[in-house]
Amino acid sequence: MDTLILGLPVAYYIAMVAKVLVAFVFVLLTVAYATYAERKIIGHMQVRLGPMRTGWHGLLQPIADGVKLFFKEEIIPDQASKFAFLLAPLVALIPAFISFAVIPFGGTIEVFGYKVPLQIAAYYDQAGAQVFDINVGVLYILAMASLGVYGVVLAGWSSNSKYSLLGGLRSAAQMISYELSAGLAIIAVFMLSGSLSLHQIVAAQADGAWYVFKQPIAFVIFFICSLAEINRTPFDLPEAETELVSGFITEYSSMKYAMFFMAEYANMVTVCAVTTTLFLGGWHGPAFLPGWFWFVAKVYFLIFVCMWIRATYPRYRYDQLMHLGWKVFLPITLLNIVGTGIWIAVTQF
Amino acid sequence: MIMPLLKGLQITFSHMFKKPVTLQYPTERPAIKPNFRGLHVLNVSHDRAKCVACYLCPTVCPAKCITVEAGEDAKHDKFAAKYEIDMLRCIFCGYCVEACPVDAIRMSETFELANYTRADFTFTKERLLEKK
């Protein structure tokens, strides 16, 4: 147990691998069954049944869909820019998954006397008895979120198709308008927590002092902007099927299409996890159930809200989208920051 | 501006608990109403079709899908030697049933009329006769 590799005990590496596997499998399964849940929930909201035939109440539908997509013919357009065309799905998918590295999905658990924080990029200092994680975790998440959009833009550009290009352009414009407001909404949270480390932001929200109560405006705006950033309804303009066939994924088929699909749902899981961490107290909850349970429950609740929104609202028009981003959310978030600053000044000095 | 959005969310949420209107078709069957107009049936009386080959049904038929040819039986009675309905032309209006003076034709609850060849859609007298 006392053998050190690069100054860290062996148990650290074992715990790290275990955490990566657990988080990755969790996100993958959630992504697979989010597609099923979405079809079921939207189905019932439209007084339909949703998938019913594949397995009991259609429970095997995600597996059937996966197998189907896997065996489909791979088509690369003749005039497409091959390298970028092949790269784009990866650029879209990978940032969606690696954002999970900094999200704390539980408290600290003890395995054989070795304390492990349930956060992938974190380390429990046994001597100092405290958790260290990336001190700019939120910055990392914002970076990954904007990186994912490059996949969409690249896909649109490299496909050499009008619809794809328009989808990609819309995505780029949408990202710029909404990331700004999302970032400014989070700033109000930093002002209260005084830290960019997600572990400390969650720790600051212990005992029900969730930031959703202190920053309701920031919460709502961050959640809406996140929906816009991951191209979900009512902001799914990049793939608006009524106007742009399928937008940036028009020319994609087989597994590359599946990767964009997975990226969309993985992004949704990530965004819901980030929102949970920043505003809903992360893994904190009544103590009779473990922390990871509360984290998963909150994330699933937010995923449900995403689907609920999708079942309710029609797509925004392009000018409405821009109006909402620049003329409504941006001023509100700026005012929110000023208001938070005044509040902190009044209460703390 | 915000209240209509919340109202929309409330409506979709309440719909989630409604009974779905979906009919799981091949396993669940629709409840067919008594006046449903499905596949035609030639009524049978005393082991023979009631049809007297009066030609009223092909006359009234707006789709011109009924072909009748009269014959004479051993008792010198007129009967339909040939009675065919082309189901690809039939519009299931039910005028033939209304026109029939001897109640020889009616419409059943059968609505699954898909077939593989065009010839299979020509329903001859044998196929139309009431099954007892």
Image (cartoon, helix red, strand yellow):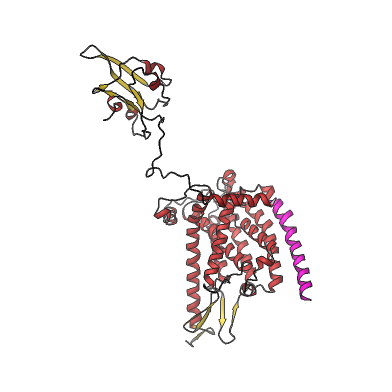
Q: Main secondary structure of the magenta part?
A: helix
Does residue A310 appear to the left or right of A70 in the view shown?
Answer: right
Give the percent coordinates (x, y) of residue A329.
71, 57
Name the foreground residue: A333 vs B80. B80
Does residue B14 appear to the left or right of A346 in the view shown?
Answer: left
Q: Residue furthest left?
A: B74
Q: Residue at left 55%, top 53%?
A: A81
Is residue A205 shown in magenta?
Answer: no
Q: Residue at left 47%, top 62%?
A: A29
Give the percent coordinates (x, y) of residue A204.
65, 74
Give the percent coordinates (x, y) of residue A273.
57, 65
Q: Quadrant location of residue A348?
A: bottom right
Judge whether A314 appears above or below A266 on screen. Answer: above
Q: Residue furthest top?
A: B76
Name the foreground residue: A265 vs A253. A265
Does residue B31 appear to the left or right of A276 in the view shown?
Answer: left
Name the foreground residue: A130 vs A179. A130
Q: Residue at left 72%, top 61%?
A: A333
Whether residue A294 is visible here, answered yes or no, is yes
Give the percent coordinates (x, y) of residue A335.
76, 62
**Which image quadrant: the C terminus of chain A?**
bottom right
Judge whether A276 appears above or below A229 on screen. Answer: below
Segment tinted magenta in the rendering: A321-349
Does residue A59 appear to the left or right of B121 in the view shown?
Answer: right
Q: Residue at left 40%, top 52%?
A: A54
Judge whether A151 appears above or below B63 on screen. Answer: below
Q: Quadrant location of residue B33?
A: top left
Is residue A338 shown in magenta?
Answer: yes
Q: How many marks do you count on the picture? A: 0
